[in-house]
Image (cartoon, rainbow, N blue to C red):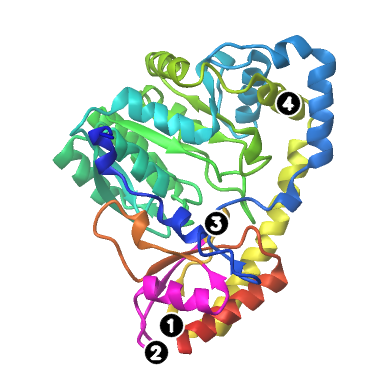
């Protein structure tokens, strides 16, 4: 068979390939980016399902508008208001997870050869998605405070990208939190260079202490002209249930119209049953308690992982403890045993019964082979301590 040439630009996900090795009994996995199913509010979702079937069964089980089920759009607008962003229901479309929002941006914005700036490192699926549509990806370096805006400006001037893609709040894989000062600078750059900024925000509600700075979307009112140059992608996957596949995109009306047209071709609409369930859940007011619970549990696990890494690996690994999200981003220093290749470390770790993801695939260019991503989301504190102890054995054994 002769497949489309664009498939030559992408590779199978390194994470999915790693999952093939995880069938070994007793393995402790820090590899995935999934939320812990033990934290799903099953009772609340069950009540939402029943309410959807009781109150509007016809609408919940029927075809729906491509833009989304209107009661859910209204609830999502209200949810965004709690986070400081003023959004009308008509200013967002519902997507099948935020992943579809990224795909729709690729379809509507990228022509082969277009340049797109992403963080280095960034979400692996974004690299694959944008390359599928023929983008040339340019990496902007980050630190613990997010993208380095001085370098970002130089890259915008040099490459004139179609858009800039950022995960400002507890990024995947970096866990980085873009500072308030840099957030304002990003918005100013958007206006100065008339450049679209895509804000991907699946983790912004998963903070451990003080709330993070407002989203770029929420801050856009303070930077005249920046709102029309923003596309915001949100998701209920990490805070409620990934199985619902409910995400949303907020953007300029012209962008949303094009995205809606492309969505109509691909899936007609996101499941109305899932949308009606999500709408009823948000309407019932259970989300604040759910968020408080998951924040508390993930904060405990993140602290356990940070302490265990310091205890078991010491100076051989460097990292900044995340203030939220699901991940630690670390770098092998070579201090103990001389190992700096995270790919080799991953192989040794599997032999010891623990898994993580080497960091190189998260870079669109110039990968750092000493980096790795560890998720604390699905392992309890005891498993985290045991798994990190095994990592220590893998490093020295």
User: Residue 102, position in %: x, y?
Assistant: 42, 33
Element assignment for label 4: helix
Query: Which mark sits nearer the N-terminus, 4 or 1?
Result: 4
Dots 1, 2 in contact, CB < 8 A: yes
User: Which region is colored magenta?
Assistant: 328-355
Q: Are marks 4 and 2 in contact (CB under 8 Å)?
A: no
Rounded to the nearest angstrom, the CA distance separating label 1 from label 2 is 8 Å
- Of labels 1 and 2, earlier in sequence is 1
| Residue 224 part of the magenta segment | no
The mark found on residue 277 in the picture is: 4
User: What residue sits 65% from the left and 32% below the top?
Assistant: 82
Of residues 241 and 144, the one nearer the viewer is 241
* Tags 1 and 3 touching, CB below 8 Å: no
- The circle on residue 32 is 3
| N-term mark: 2 or 3 | 3
- Measured as percent of width and height from the top left, residue 264 is found at 47, 15
Identify the mark nearer the N-term, 1 or 3. Answer: 3
Q: Residues within 10 Å of mark 3 (few under 14, many from 20)?
A: many
Crowd rating for badge 1 (residues with CA inside 10 Å; few <14, some 14–19, many 20+):
many
Number of labelled discs?
Answer: 4
The disc placed on residue 316 is 1
- The residues bearing labels 2 and 3 have C-alpha atoms spaced at a distance of 27 Å
The residue labelled by disc 2 is 337
Task: State the CA–CA distance, disc 4 to disc 2.
Answer: 52 Å
Which comes sooner in the sequence, label 3 or label 4?
A: 3
Q: Residue at x 31, y 65 (%)?
A: 368
Q: Nearer the viewer, mark 4 or mark 1?
A: 4
């Amino acid at each position: 068979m002769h497949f489309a040439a664009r498939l030559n630009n992408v590779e199978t996900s390194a994470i999915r390939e790693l999952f093939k090795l995880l069938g070994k009994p007793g393995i402790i996995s820090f590899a995935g980016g999934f939320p812990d199913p033990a934290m799903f509010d099953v009772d609340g979702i069950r009540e939402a399902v029943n309410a959807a079937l009781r109150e509007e069964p016809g609408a919940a089980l029927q075809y729906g508008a491509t833009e989304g089920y209107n009661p859910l759009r209204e609830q999502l607008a209200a949810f965004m208001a709690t986070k400081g962003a003023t959004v009308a229901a008509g200013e967002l479309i519902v997507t099948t997870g935020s992943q579809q929002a990224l795909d729709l941006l690729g379809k509507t914005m990228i022509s082969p050869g277009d340049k797109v700036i992403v963080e280095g490192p960034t979400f692996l699926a974004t690299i694959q998605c944008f390359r599928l549509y023929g983008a040339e990806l340019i990496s902007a370096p980050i630190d613990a405070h997010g993208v380095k805006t001085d370098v970002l400006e130089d890259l915008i001037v040099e490459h004139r990208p179609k858009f800039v893609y950022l995960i400002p709040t507890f990024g995947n894989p970096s866990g980085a939190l873009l500072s308030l000062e840099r957030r304002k600078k990003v918005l100013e750059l958007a206006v100065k260079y008339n450049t679209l900024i895509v804000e991907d925000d699946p983790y912004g509600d998963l903070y451990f202490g003080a709330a993070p700075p407002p989203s770029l979307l929420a801050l856009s009112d303070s930077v005249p002209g920046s709102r029309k140059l923003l596309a915001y992608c949100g998701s209920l996957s990490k805070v409620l249930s990934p199985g619902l596949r409910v995400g949303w995109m907020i953007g300029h009306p012209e962008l949303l119209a094009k995205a809606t047209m492309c969505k109509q071709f691909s899936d007609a609409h996101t499941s109305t049953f899932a949308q009606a369930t999500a709408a009823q859940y948000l309407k019932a007011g259970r989300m604040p308690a759910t968020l408080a619970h998951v924040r508390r549990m993930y904060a405990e696990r993140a602290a356990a992982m940070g302490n265990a890494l310091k205890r078991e690996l010491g100076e051989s690994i460097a990292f900044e403890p995340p203030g939220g999200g699901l991940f630690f981003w670390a770098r092998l220093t070579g201090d103990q045993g001389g190992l700096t290749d995270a790919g080799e470390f991953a192989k040794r770790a599997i032999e010891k019964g623990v898994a993580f993801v080497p960091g190189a695939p998260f870079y669109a260019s110039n990968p750092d082979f000493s980096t790795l991503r560890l998720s604390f989301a699905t392992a309890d504190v005891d498993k985290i301590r045991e798994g990190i102890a095994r990592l220590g054995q893998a490093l020295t054994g």
